[in-house]
Amino acid sequence: MHMAMGQLKNLGYLDTRQLDSASTRVVRMASEPLPGGLYQEVYHVVFQQEDGKRLEVITRSKASDQECSMGPVEVYLVNRKLQDPPANGR
């Protein structure tokens, strides 16, 4: 979460002064064991700002039992989430 927050702040997507920390949600979507005692982890993070602006990201990183991040964290900004399929099936 913190690595994603830093990247979003540095790129101008997130104003951390306006962040509603109590409403920030982090959900682990996947964890896969890798060789050497590492894990590939995928998280869904939702940042809520006090002005109502909401940013959703997916992060992917490698972790170990000792460190939450064993390399760069990839951050993917969720631009649009499909709610319901269109009536015509497209």
Image (cartoon, helix red, strand yellow):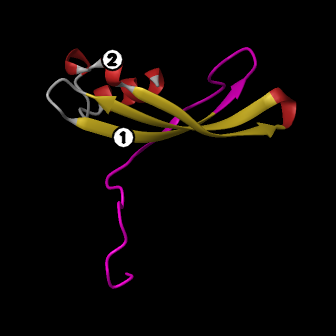
Query: Which residue is rendered at x = 80% and y = 38% of the image?
Result: 34
Horizontal side of residue 27 vs 56, given as left or right: right
How far separated are the C-alphas under marks 2 and 1? 14 Å
Q: How many marks?
A: 2
Q: Amino acid at mark 2?
A: Ser
Residues in magenta?
62-90
* Vertical order, 63 against 87 (above or below): above
Q: Amino acid at mark 1?
A: Glu
Q: Given contact means CB atoms under 8 Å apart, are the residues at marks 2 and 1 in contact?
A: no
Q: Name the N-terminal-most of marks 2 and 1.
A: 2
Residue 8 quadrant? top left
Asked if residue 38 is among those painted magenta in the image, a careful observer would answer no
Q: Position of residue 50 (x, y in %)?
A: 18, 23
Horizontal side of residue 84 vs 40, given as left or right: left
Q: Secondary structure at mark 1?
A: strand
* Vertical order, 80 against 18 (above or below): below
Q: Position of residue 45 (x, y in %)?
A: 44, 34
Asked if residue 71 is among those painted magenta in the image, a careful observer would answer yes
Q: Secondary structure at mark 2?
A: helix
Disc sitting over residue 21 in the figure: 2
The local crowd at label 2, few if under 14, some if 14 to 19, many if 20 or more residues have their Cα within 10 Å, is few
Residue 15 quadrant? top left
Query: Which residue is rendered at x = 47% and y = 25% of the image?
Result: 1
> Residue at label 1?
56
In the orientation shown, which residue stands out farthest toward the left?
A: 51
Quadrant showing the C terminus = bottom left
Residue 30 quadrant? top right
The rendered magenta stretch, by its main secondary structure, is classed as loop
Query: Which residue is rendered at x = 37% and y = 48% of the image?
Result: 78
Q: Position of residue 55 (x, y in %)?
A: 30, 38
The local crowd at label 1, few if under 14, some if 14 to 19, many if 20 or more residues have their Cα within 10 Å, is some
* Vertical order, 42 against 64 (above or below): below
